[in-house]
Image (cartoon, grey):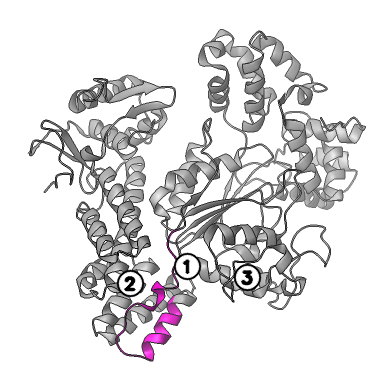
Amino acid sequence: MIRPPARPAPAGTVYFSLLGPLTAVRDGRPLPLGPRKQRLVLATLLARPNTPVPVDVLTDAVWPDDPPRTARKNLQVYVSAARALLGSDSRDGRDRVVHGCGGYRLTIGEGELDTLRFRSLARAGRAAGERGDLRMAARLLREALDLWEGPPLNDLRDSTGVAEEAERLEARCLTVYEDWAETEIELGRAAVAVDGLRDLVERHPLRERLRVAWMNSLHQSGRQAEALAVYDDYRQLLARELGLEPSPAMAALYRAMLGRGRTARPAAAGREAAHGTALPAAPRDFTGRREELRELLALLGSPDERVVVVSGPVGSGKSALALRAAHLLGDGFPDGRFHVQVRREDGSARTPAEVLGELGRLCGVRAPGGSGVPAESAVTAASAETAASAVAADSAVPADATVPVGPERGPAAAAVSQGAADAWQRWLSLHRALIVLDDVPDEAFVRGLLPRSGPSSVVLTARGQLAGLAPVHRIALGALADGEALELLGKLIGPGRLRTDPAAALRIVRACGALPLAVGVGGMRLAVLRHLPLAEYADRLGDPSAALDELVAGDISVRLHMASGWQDLSADDRRALGRLAGPAPEGGFTLDGAMEALGCGERAAIRTVESLIDAGAVTSPAGEVTAHAALYEVPRLLCLYAREREEGRFSPG
């Protein structure tokens, strides 16, 4: 049964539901939504309301494997059918579905779509809870959950694209259910949540927050033995499936239940209210990276992945990808989404204590004694072993070892104090937040900041591979495909100008190494120099001695970004990269070429090349191939910069 919106809509309004099968009603009567492909297009547009949906996303939803040559024309037919179904906007008479440079945008209001109403009610419920009005919070959250009628879009999940959207919607519903159940428990009305929590735990057995709420609801209802059994079952499941233990917070709750009678949920006071979002603006010119974005969103939406490393050369768009995903995830992280820049403006790394101090201020973390997590001035170098103990089991570092906080830093460098580290880990164990640590210099820097338990997730962006971190999931970025790079350039200079000389435009993006940073800077320069023919600019970029001079727009210089990456390398790696860049053809080099350039034997050449791969300075084939058969490459602009350094032509401009 389709539930009408809580706010009455004008007669004749179509009301859509995604929180269950895709359905639509007008004046209480169900509407036919057409053939399956048409419904897939409609579902994809509705899943991203009031937001441009790229044509490629729609194409993938309808034809995930092999789209026909007529795919775009067919999409136009399906979109026209959606327009006819939706009608015009009652406010201005315009079409509800319009096409622009970012794709198709469907305009729809809260009273016409269940997911928008759901989001509004959930936000109002959480706000009431933060004000201390728990009864109002429970009522609003329950009203939101009444819109949830089963797995979202369950009739269209055989499409991978729609299934991913549906999983994100379901994750939001689960989070709201957890909020509601915890509120009812705090009100002393645990019995109303017991059965629903049991059903959801059966469907999502590894979701710890659900388990904790179920434990508390059973315990408060006087069913102590069943509550303890929930913990035992979960502990055995984690050990069997993942080789892990329940979080310290859940273990503490279990021990507390063993020693007392019926009480309300003890963790409520320790779980601060959601602290909102502290993210830079979403990158407006984000282009391409569809597979990588899809993978990152799926990983962060999964209960099993806590840490994801996004790596790639300087200028490959790591930060843009991480921020794009963080903005899209929205309600999946009710306790906040936070971004922290790990480096200063000059490219030097901050200390872990400084970064933890900023995280503490953003998240409201309280260290022992009631003060916030201290910044660098309040920490001691003597407790650097905290970072080691957090990951000793994973990294084979002895638990009592002192872990350096970054490359080439002396023993006086500030480390994170034990109290601050414990306060941060406790906060992570009790909250579902997303932390983006941007431009991480090395593994040692972040070990003590990563969650040991709990539902929070961390995205690390880094030039190097951070090979010493385990277990983490890795997404490696390279250059953009030609089509993606051209699309990015077109966004900056205008598609009309791009079409005046497509061959020259292609030369420009290839001369930029198809790196988003360089293509973006080149595009911004061309956007100012409107008189400059594309062919002339392509000729300038094609000159190895002038390319980096041309890639400057205002205060943004590609050369300075390359310089920062260069400084990250060890002295040996810088020396080797300079030698490899000298004779390296733009098509790449082989192991034999590396041996000749480095003047060493095979084993030493392999170690050197692999060290540069680990540092993000050399790219290697994506698939498995022997060292002798592999074709390695120094990204073009880094190669030009390394030649400048080798030849003594470096200038900081």
**Tag on residue 180?**
none
Image coordinates for residue 380, horizontal then vertical, percent: 74, 71
**Tag on residue 454?**
1
Q: Residue at x 33, y 72 (%)?
A: 213
| Residue 239 left/right relative to 391 | left
| Residue 551 left/right relative to 188 | right
Disc nearer the start of the sequence (1/2) = 2
Quickly name the residue at label 3.
420
Determine whether 445 is above or below 627 in the image.
below
Residue 634 shows in the view: no
Secondary structure at numbered mark 3: helix
Determine whether 524 is above or below 4 in the image.
above
Label 1 to label 2: alpha-carbon separation: 14 Å
Q: Which segment did they paint magenta?
A: 250-274
Image coordinates for residue 306, horizontal then vertical, percent: 51, 60
Label 3 to label 2: alpha-carbon separation: 28 Å
| Quarter of the figure that contains the C terminus | top right
Q: Residue at x 25, y 84 (%)?
A: 223
Confirm or deny contact between disc 3 and disc 1 (CB under 8 A). no
| Residue 315 left/right relative to 118 | right
Image coordinates for residue 356, horizontal then vertical, percent: 63, 61
Q: Of the residues shown, which amino acid type is indicated by label 2? A: Ala
User: Pointer 2: residues within 10 angstroms few (<14), some, or many (20+)?
Assistant: many
Label 3 to label 1: alpha-carbon separation: 17 Å
Q: Residue at x 64, y 43 (%)?
A: 312
Q: Residue at x 90, y 29 (%)?
A: 649
Secondary structure at numbered mark 2: helix
Name the quadrant containing residue 175.
bottom left
Is 270 contained in the magenta span? yes
Quickly name the residue at label 2.
213
